[in-house]
Image (spheres, grey):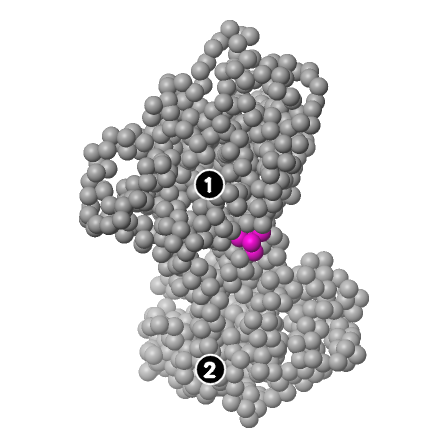
């Protein structure tokens, strides 16, 4: 009996989630006339919108987003892994560093963006990747470190100690024995962090300009109040959404396990 | 193999002294067991020897070398941890070879030694598997194999048997003894299980609250406990310890109790009166048998003597033929069986 | 052995350095700004003490924005918690096509918020949107972005995107609960509702607390949906804090004022976290 309600709930949820996707996908292939009449279900698909995507620099902005994301995550993983290991194993910085990381996470972008903007302006770094990457690090770094601390906590100390007694220095023990065990976690954290960077609008909107347009900014630029760019915008949205949805499928199981295993225990 | 000496070793965490001025010589080629309740400092001492904990003051010598400031990797020791610390991403063979690779031992030599160790421990057929595919006992053997293969100056075992079920534990104890006799290794073994200490050790070191209570052979420690703590800790079921006054009042003990604060008697020395010859000096008293726990060849009796004083007796099942719960037979404790302790817990002569 | 400490700090140094540079410094700078009357155009910057802050107290627009944001956070997080719990419970029991369903239902939280905002902007648009069309055939006309409903619509968009986040955390929490209490309840004959109220909920409390805190923190920063759809309107019906700060700083160029607004927001957020943390601690102590 309850089973029926349960299935109904999930079915409804699936429909609610799928509906906007479906609509956007359809819209990406409709021409202008078809778009004006949303109830029409049959139409001749057109690729006009996608030409707009290629010519209108949507792909270019996607590439910029990709680059920004990779660099941001790269830096965050290297710096974060070292720091997380220190915090997990040596309790370096004590409660202060754990707390400090949490604090960074709490800061609303609104409070950080003005100084970042001014500094970028003064250093003539406006509209460069450096500014955007720096701003993304402010929310990626704490998240990645937080996850990694959880993962490191999950590896028993005995592993390094065994390696150290067997003849390795601590650094070597870390590399050979601890790192391989944490690698899947690092992967998941990296993907998660990449998605955070990929999706950011606020910082990219303010700190980037003509040269460094990221995908969300480009998508937002279709948003004129005339609303006639619907087709092209839908195509651009798909370019932004599809990679992320695919990533989600890969990461889903690890995330659930990772959060229930590592993060929640903090 | 080498002798290990600890000189005035102290470990302090802030205000807490986990290990207080331990002086200990570990004999070469023998098994020395550090035993005591949790928190007594035995593991901390072991970890200091390994180099995993810093030393607050004191020195550690391996052979003639003062290793007190050295990194673990430079001390030439092998350690086996409580949960084996087998690397899950490597095969058994790679796990065993791990320490050798660190020291750049040539490949052929590594393979030979791994083979030897695996055969000695009966895991030769498991070399290609991953630790996750092994049973607890097999993992244990691989962990020991990993230690053996390094041919270190000494082995450090940190409660390696604690994760095994009772039966396996007994099996593995015999294994450890067999391997040690074969290799003549110097082993420092830490455990909280006094039975394990008794069966494995050439020498037993009983620790409590960071201090050494007694060092001696298993027989010494059992028959002549140096302190009340050792007397209670070693031996199962636990020794009966009473205030001297209570012993006088409820059991009618005379003479032996004079001058001592507390008296102890092991359950096996509390016998049914019929088992003790009439002319032997002993105190005899009636007691109510409250509970009989049959172990097989022997049985533990919970007795209630005069003034509600409770004692435990360990008797052979045979002698129980006509004794049941609720009976009140006569019991006897020979004069020599008593252990005398002063108020501070120290042993007093009889 | 005392060398161990330097190694730890050596590992930690790059992280702390970056955080100091990218977060601590801007924070400090922001604080400084909030005590000045800096604008982009002004040449001489004067230190005005707490004037910017007191100005906010009399700024009606700011009050409205704060109110809108608080209403938004409470409604959105509340709905997401309730829905999320239901869905997580349902997903936990599901057998058929389990991974696929879960992965699919979790996707909205990963989509670019601006894309979500725009999707809904046009889905709900009177002329071009599919939903008003469908409602039209049923004879119902709803102006989703009109003065009465605009904030609610923004809440709905947030619910679409972020309920999956709640589902993720709650599902992880549910799956890490120990089996035994539930088995004991089954043997004792407890009803489904009783099991839920007396066992599931209390055990899940820490997870719920974290999920609510995380989501609420995020909800305070809401910007993209407003930017995509109403731009604060109609009037100031959907003017949220972060959007207002954006406008104050980058449309009106009043940087000092924007910094002050930002800091008040920080204060509100910190208070929220401390209060929720206290509540959680007290629950833990009680159980």
Direction from residue C217 to residue C100 in the image, left or right: right
Tag 2's secondary structure? strand
Crowding around mark 2 (Cα neighbors within 10 Å: few <14, some 14 to 19, many 20+) is some
Q: Which residues are magenta?
A: A70-74
Q: How many marks?
A: 2
Decide: is A235 above or below A185.
above
Q: Please give the residue where the numbered disc 2 appears in the rendered image.
A: B214
Figure quadrant of the C terminus of chain C: top left
Tag 1's secondary structure? helix
Letter of the chain that mark 1 sits on in the rendering: A
The image shows residue B206 at horizontal and vertical percentages of 48, 78
Q: Is residue B101 visible?
A: yes
Residue B95, by quadrant, is bottom right
Residue visible at 62% across and 16% down? A33
Q: Is residue C82 visible?
A: no
Residue found farthest to the bottom: B64
Q: Which mark is residue A205?
A: 1
Task: In this rendered view, identify the residue nearer to me: B50 or A199.
Answer: A199
Viewer-nearest of labels 2 and 1?
Answer: 1
């Amino acid at each position: 009996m309850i089973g029926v309600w349960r299935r109904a709930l999930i079915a409804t949820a699936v429909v609610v989630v799928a509906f906007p996707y479906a609509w956007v996908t359809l819209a990406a292939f409709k021409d202008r006339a078809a778009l004006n009449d949303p109830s029409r279900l049959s139409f001749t698909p057109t690729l006009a919108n996608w030409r707009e995507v290629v010519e209108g620099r949507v792909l270019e902005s996607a590439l910029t987003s990709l680059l920004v994301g990779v660099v941001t995550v790269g830096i965050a993983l290297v710096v974060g892994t070292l720091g997380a290991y220190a915090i997990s194993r040596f309790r370096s910085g004590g409660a202060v560093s754990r707390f400090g990381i949490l604090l960074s996470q709490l800061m609303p972008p609104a409070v950080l963006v003005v100084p970042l903007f001014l500094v970028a302006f003064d250093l003539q770094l406006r509209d460069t990747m450096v500014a955007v990457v720096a701003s993304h690090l402010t929310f990626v770094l704490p998240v990645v470190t937080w996850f990694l601390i959880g993962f490191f906590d999950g590896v028993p100390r005995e592993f390094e100690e065994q390696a150290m007694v067997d003849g390795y220095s601590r650094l070597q023990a870390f590399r050979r024995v601890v790192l391989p065990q944490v690698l899947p976690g690092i992967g998941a954290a990296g993907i998660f962090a990449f998605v955070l960077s990929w999706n950011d609008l606020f910082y990219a909107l303010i700190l980037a300009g003509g040269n460094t347009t990221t995908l969300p900014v480009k998508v937002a630029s279709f948003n004129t109040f005339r609303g006639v760019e619907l087709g092209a915008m839908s195509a651009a949205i798909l370019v932004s959404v599809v990679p992320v949805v695919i990533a989600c499928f890969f990461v889903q199981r690890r995330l659930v396990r990772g959060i229930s295993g590592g993060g929640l225990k903090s | 193999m080498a002798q290990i000496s600890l000189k005035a070793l102290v470990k302090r965490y802030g205000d807490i002294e986990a290990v207080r001025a331990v002086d200990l010589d570990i004999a070469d080629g023998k098994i020395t067991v550090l035993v005591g309740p949790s928190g007594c400092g035995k593991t901390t001492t072991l970890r200091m020897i390994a180099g995993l904990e810093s030393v607050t003051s004191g020195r550690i010598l391996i052979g003639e070398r003062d290793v007190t400031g050295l990194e673990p990797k430079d001390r030439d020791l092998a350690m086996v941890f409580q949960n084996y610390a087998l690397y899950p991403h490597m095969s058994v063979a790679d796990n065993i070879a791990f320490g050798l690779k660190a020291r750049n031992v040539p490949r052929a030599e590594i393979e030979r030694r791994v083979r030897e160790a695996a055969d000695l421990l009966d895991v030769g057929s498991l070399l290609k598997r991953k630790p996750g595919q092994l049973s607890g006992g097999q993992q244990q053997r691989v962990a020991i194999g990993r230690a053996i293969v390094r041919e270190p100056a000494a082995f450090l075992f940190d409660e390696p048997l604690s994760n095994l079920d009772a039966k396996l534990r007994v099996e593995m104890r015999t294994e450890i003894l067999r391997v040690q006799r074969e290799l003549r290794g110097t082993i420092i073994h830490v455990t909280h299980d006094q039975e394990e200490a008794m069966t494995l050790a050439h020498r037993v070191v009983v620790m409590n609250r960071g201090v050494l209570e007694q060092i001696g052979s298993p027989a010494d420690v059992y028959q002549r406990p140096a302190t009340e703590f050792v007397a209670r800790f070693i031996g199962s079921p636990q020794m009966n310890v009473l205030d001297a006054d209570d012993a006088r009042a409820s059991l009618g003990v005379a003479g032996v109790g004079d001058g001592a604060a507390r008296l102890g008697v092991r359950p096996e020395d509390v016998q049914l009166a019929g088992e003790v010859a009439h002319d032997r000096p002993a105190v005899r008293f009636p007691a109510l048998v409250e509970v009989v726990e049959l172990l097989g060849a022997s049985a533990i009796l919970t007795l209630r003597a005069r003034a509600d004083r409770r004692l435990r007796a360990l008797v052979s099942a045979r002698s129980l033929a006509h004794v049941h719960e609720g009976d009140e037979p006569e019991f006897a404790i020979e004069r020599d069986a008593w252990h005398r302790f002063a108020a501070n817990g120290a042993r007093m002569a009889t | 052995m005392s060398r161990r400490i330097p190694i730890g700090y050596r590992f930690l140094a790059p992280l702390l350095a970056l955080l100091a540079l990218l977060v601590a410094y801007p924070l400090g700078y922001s604080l400084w700004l909030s005590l000045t009357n800096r604008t982009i155009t002004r040449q001489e910057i004067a230190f005005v003490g707490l004037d910017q802050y007191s100005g906010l107290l009399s700024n009606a627009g700011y009050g409205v924005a704060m109110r809108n944001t608080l209403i938004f956070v409470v409604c959105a997080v509340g709905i997401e918690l309730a829905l999320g719990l239901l869905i997580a419970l349902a997903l936990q029991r599901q057998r058929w096509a389990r991974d696929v369903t879960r992965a699919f239902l979790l996707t909205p939280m990963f989509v670019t918020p601006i894309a979500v905002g725009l999707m809904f902007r046009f889905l709900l648009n009177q002329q071009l949107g599919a939903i008003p069309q469908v409602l039209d055939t049923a004879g119902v006309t709803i102006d989703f972005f009109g003065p009465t409903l605009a904030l609610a619509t923004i809440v709905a968009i947030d619910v679409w995107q972020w309920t999956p986040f709640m589902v993720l955390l709650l599902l992880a929490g549910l799956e890490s609960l120990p089996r035994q209490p539930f088995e004991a309840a089954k043997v004792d004959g407890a009803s489904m509702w009783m099991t839920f109220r007396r066992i599931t909920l209390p055990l899940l409390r820490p997870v719920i607390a974290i999920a609510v805190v995380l989501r609420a923190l995020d909800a305070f920063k809401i910007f993209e949906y407003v930017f995509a759809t109403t731009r604060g309107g109609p009037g100031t019906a959907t003017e949220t804090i972060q959007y207002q700060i954006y406008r104050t700083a980058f449309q009106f160029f009043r940087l000092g004022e924007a910094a002050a607004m930002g800091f008040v927001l920080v204060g509100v957020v910190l208070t929220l976290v401390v209060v929720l943390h206290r509540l959680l601690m007290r629950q833990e102590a009680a159980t």
